[in-house]
Image (cartoon, grey):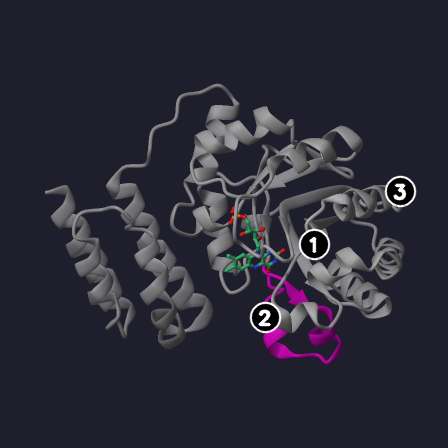
Amino acid sequence: MKIGDLEIKGRTVLAPLAGITNLPFRLIAKECGCSLVCSEMVSAKGLQYNSQKTKKLLETAPGERPVSVQIFGAEADCMARAASYIEAEQGADIIDINFGCSVKKVAKTGAGVALMKDFHNAREIIRAVRAAISIPFTIKIRSGWDSSATQAFEIARMAEDNGVDAIAIHPRTAAQAFRGRADWSVIKQLKQMLSIPVIGNGDITTPEEGIAMVEETGCDGVMVGRAAMGDPFIFAGIEALLRGEPWAEPSLQERFAVMERLVDSHVDYLGERVACKMMRSRLSWFVKGLDGASVFRRELTGIESRDQAISLIRSYGDGLVA
Ligand SMILES: Cc1cc2nc3c(=O)[nH]c(=O)nc-3n(C[C@H](O)[C@H](O)[C@H](O)COP(=O)(O)O)c2cc1C
């Protein structure tokens, strides 16, 4: 897949997930076969106010590249300044704009999915950001604000005409949030309509479903969000099947080794106290369906240190393998 002049080796994309796709998680997704990782959404306003918390979200590492950094906001000038700063200072390979966030706090400011119903401002923002950066530029949209998908088609066509290099689509409306099924037929229609790459997103939970999306819609890339939170190996699975190679689920040892790396990398990145608190939920996502998962989950709620987390993972893993 080629986004602007950037060649992506493979077709899988990690969805931006606020609070989840931080630098350590992206590195793990990359290690597990993901071709393009994306940051969580970053507030353009927060950057304008020089918020250190916001700036931390922009950290990237050579090992995860190519990396896309997603920004959100409702003001063209502010978005353009943020994009330009990220290109110049932060080592991003792609700037992505959020046209999909339906969380009230974001949408009520005119940002995120609210841009889907404000064609004029959406165009202002896209033009301003395009003029401000020379790296590839993408947007991630929903099917629309309300029940029809016409807004997706209008915004996508306008985006292509104004120099956007690829579009990711999560085909649910703002009103749906995460309810109902993603309507993959919208991905197919967008693909037929546009010349730039279309990245399909929504409800992929297995490598086989990733292939089904490509076959049903003809999309260029496959973006996975929630399923990757506890199963980053899904990316290697999709890539293997797309190449026509067999795919076997990772062994328990591989799964548990990734859990240990998740702990260590978060401790390095966030410090032990914050990381351990975060790991209480994150590690539980990795053991879905495994014997004794509920006991492991209960024990996780008490972890306070890196060593405690690692020994809990090891004793649970050893018990399963034995
Ligand atoms: C916890 C969470 C955080 C999310 N954060 C973002 C975000 O920062 N930016 C964005 O464009 N979409 C965000 N999304 C939407 C996802 O990127 C994705 O479009 C959606 O989860 C559907 O894909 P999936 O079925 O593979 O999860 C978020 C979704 C979840 C569940």
- The answer to whether 313 appears left or right of 78 in the picture is left
Q: Between tags 2 and 3, which lies in front?
A: 3
Which range of residues does the magenta coloring cover? 40-60
Q: Position of residue 49 (x, y in %)?
A: 73, 80
Q: Which residue is mark 2?
A: 56
Q: Nearer the viewer, residue 28 or 180?
A: 180
Q: Nearer the viewer, residue 122 or 59?
A: 122
Q: Nearer the viewer, residue 44 or 169?
A: 169
Type of the residue with mark 3: Asp
- Between 158 and 267, the one lying in front of the other is 158
Residue 286 seen in render: yes
> Which numbered disc, 1 or 2, marks the residue that appears first in the sequence?
2
Residue beneath label 1, please? 146
| SS class, disc 2 | helix
Looking at the image, which residue is at 58% across and 32% down?
10
Q: Is residue 192 left or right of residue 294?
A: right
Where is residue 44? Give x, y as percent.
73, 69
- Residue 258 drawn above or below residue 117: above
Residue for badge 3: 161
Q: Answer with left or right where residue 296 lies relative to residue 80.
A: left
Q: Residue furthest front?
A: 147
Badge nearest the viewer, 1 or 3: 1
